[in-house]
Each structure stands twice: as structure tokens, then as C-alpha cells.
Amino acid sequence: MPELTYHYGKMRGWEVIPGLLIWGTFGLAIILSFLAPLWAIVLIILFDVLWLYRVIYYVIHILARAPFFSTKSRFHSSSYFSSYL
């Protein structure tokens, strides 16, 4: 059976990629705002549309799961923990 331990140095490159993409997007928007303002506008609008899509997707899934959660306590009144609720 393969060993499933984490080795810090092996996968560090993959862990850095999301941060580099975000910082690269911000840097590219600033650089393009001076060199090609129209492309900077397009980049920023596309970035905003991407995040709007992600938020809407997230909200839809949260609302779809909302009926499964209730505000009632999960403990019965005879439970040991009911005095703490």
C-alpha cells in the first residue's frame, strides 16, 4: 500500500500556482491599465464575471441544502448537553 504522507518540498509548486495566478491577474491589470487600457477593462470585467458566476453557483448550492438544516437543537431535552444549549 502506498504511503500517503505529505512531504513539504514535493508538492509545493502546485500549492503556489493559485496564489501566483491571482497576483498575476492583479499585476497584469495594473500593467495593462498603463499600456492598453481597453484590455485592462476587458480583463477586469471578465474577472468580475467569473467571481459573480462563482458566487451565484455557491449560493444556489447553499440554498439547495438549506431544507436539510434546521434551527432546532439536535439534542433531546433529556440529553446531558441540553443544559448548555
Image: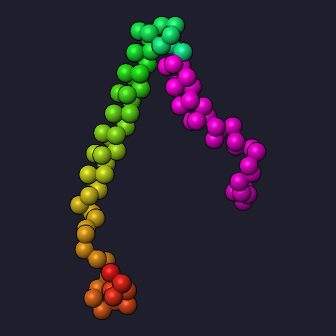
Q: Is residue 66 above or below residue 82?
A: above
Closer-to-camera residue (71/27): 27
Q: Position of residue 47 (x, y in %)?
A: 42, 26
The residue under the point 50% across, 10% down is: 34
Q: Position of residue 52 (x, y in %)?
A: 33, 33
Closer-to-camera residue (57/3): 57
Q: Which image quarter holds the N terminus?
A: bottom right
Q: Quadrant of residue 37?
A: top left
Q: Is residue 79 above or below residue 11?
A: below
The residue under the point 52% across, 7% down is: 35
Looking at the magenta stretch, what is its main secondary structure?
Answer: helix
Q: Quadrant of residue 76?
A: bottom left
Q: Is residue 41 left or right of 18 when viewed as pictured?
A: left
Asked which colour scheme the image uses, the reply is: rainbow
Q: Position of residue 13 (x, y in %)?
A: 69, 37
Q: Which image quarter holds the C terminus?
A: bottom left
Q: Position of residue 55 (x, y in %)?
A: 34, 40
Q: Is residue 74 left or right of 16 when viewed as pictured?
A: left
Q: Is residue 25 left or right of 5 when viewed as pictured?
A: left
Q: Is residue 14 left or right of 31 when viewed as pictured?
A: right
Magenta span includes 73: no
Q: Which residues are magenta?
A: 1-30
The residue under the point 69% across, 57% down is: 4
Magenta span includes 16: yes
The number of callouts visible is: 0
Q: Is residue 76 above or below residue 23?
A: below
Closer-to-camera residue (82/34): 34
- Extreme residue in the front direction: 34
